[in-house]
Image: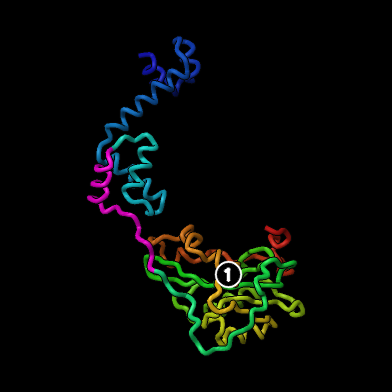
Amino acid sequence: MKYALIRRNRRLWSIRVQCRVLGVSVAGYHEHMARLLAIVRRHLSDETLLVYIRARCAAHRGAYGWPRIWRQLRAEGVRVGKLRVQQLMQQHGIRARGKRRFRITTDSRHGLPIAPNLLNRNFTVAAPNRAWAGDMTYIQTEEGWLFLAVVLDLFSRRIVGWSLREDMRSELVVDALRMASLQRSPNRKTELIFHSDRGSQYASFDFNQVLNEYSIRPSMSRKGNCSDNACSERPCSPRSRSSGCTDNTSKLSARPRTKPSTGSSGITEHDCTRH
């Protein structure tokens, strides 16, 4: 009776004041409310339980199936049987998102010229605009595939150029390199190195023409040695991709809204501090 009165008037007077006047403890009141909540959760209707399930699925971006959803509900104090969770999810078409089919972004089976490995795994760089690394990845959206090319400054590990297209033609990496060059304006006397894998896009005539235009020396990984390009593959890993886009993402919303910003010198404030 006292606890019900306190709860009914909790907007008029503080819980602590009411407990002192009625001669009950604050801890006892909260324990009583926790017991009531547990009883309510034990008798959830299907509609209410479905709201819980949808919320947990959305929080994990559709990666959880019914076993993990059931375990999480139990951990949060929702006492429900696993069979009930499974049946509800099946009835409403709620299922875990399947693994995406692997897309090949590197095609090294070509007759184009291959640059030597000038970087030679020297991923520690003393200054900005001394060594850049490039890589490509894919993003799955509800409207189809998008392909992303990035340019990474190895000094700050900052993405200084990027490009998104619906195909993997050489323009994808050319646009990313041009963005990086325009944003950073590298000094032609510093002998900037651009390191990549042996993909046909990076070995293409158009891409090498842009490298020559900005006096950038090409460098490529050795055949079958993924460690030579590990510095640029981390931003393009599946975990990094999944942090921002899901299967329900449109192509328009998957595109970055801003471009890298730089000062008049072409060097960002992030480049002044090593991460």
Question: Residue 92: image x %, image y %?
Answer: 25, 51
Type of the residue with mark 1: Ser
Out of 213 and 114, give the one closest to the viewer.
Answer: 114
User: What residue range appears in magenta?
Assistant: 81-101
Q: Where, quadrant-wise, is the C terminus in this rendering?
A: bottom right
Is residue 171 magenta-colored?
no
Colouring convention used in this rendered image of the protein: rainbow
Q: Quadrant of residue 44?
A: top left
Question: Residue 170: image x %, image y %?
Answer: 52, 82
Is residue 99 magenta-colored?
yes
Residue under the point 62% across and 76% down: 195
Residue under the point 34% across and 55% down: 96
Question: Residue 270: image x %, image y %?
Answer: 68, 60
* Drawn side of residue 130 relative to residue 137, left or right: right
Question: Residue 234: image x %, image y %?
Answer: 55, 64
- Give the residue furthest to the front: 224
Residue under the point 26% across and 41% down: 47
Label 1, on which residue? 227
Residue under the point 67% across and 63% down: 156
Out of 54 and 223, give the one closest to the viewer.
Answer: 223
Q: Quadrant of residue 210?
A: bottom right
Image vertical order of residue 259 relative to residue 202, above or below: above
- Give the residue furthest to the bottom: 111
Image vertical order of residue 81 relative to residue 215, above or below: above
* Drawn side of residue 210 relative to residue 14, left or right: right
Q: SS at mark 1?
A: helix
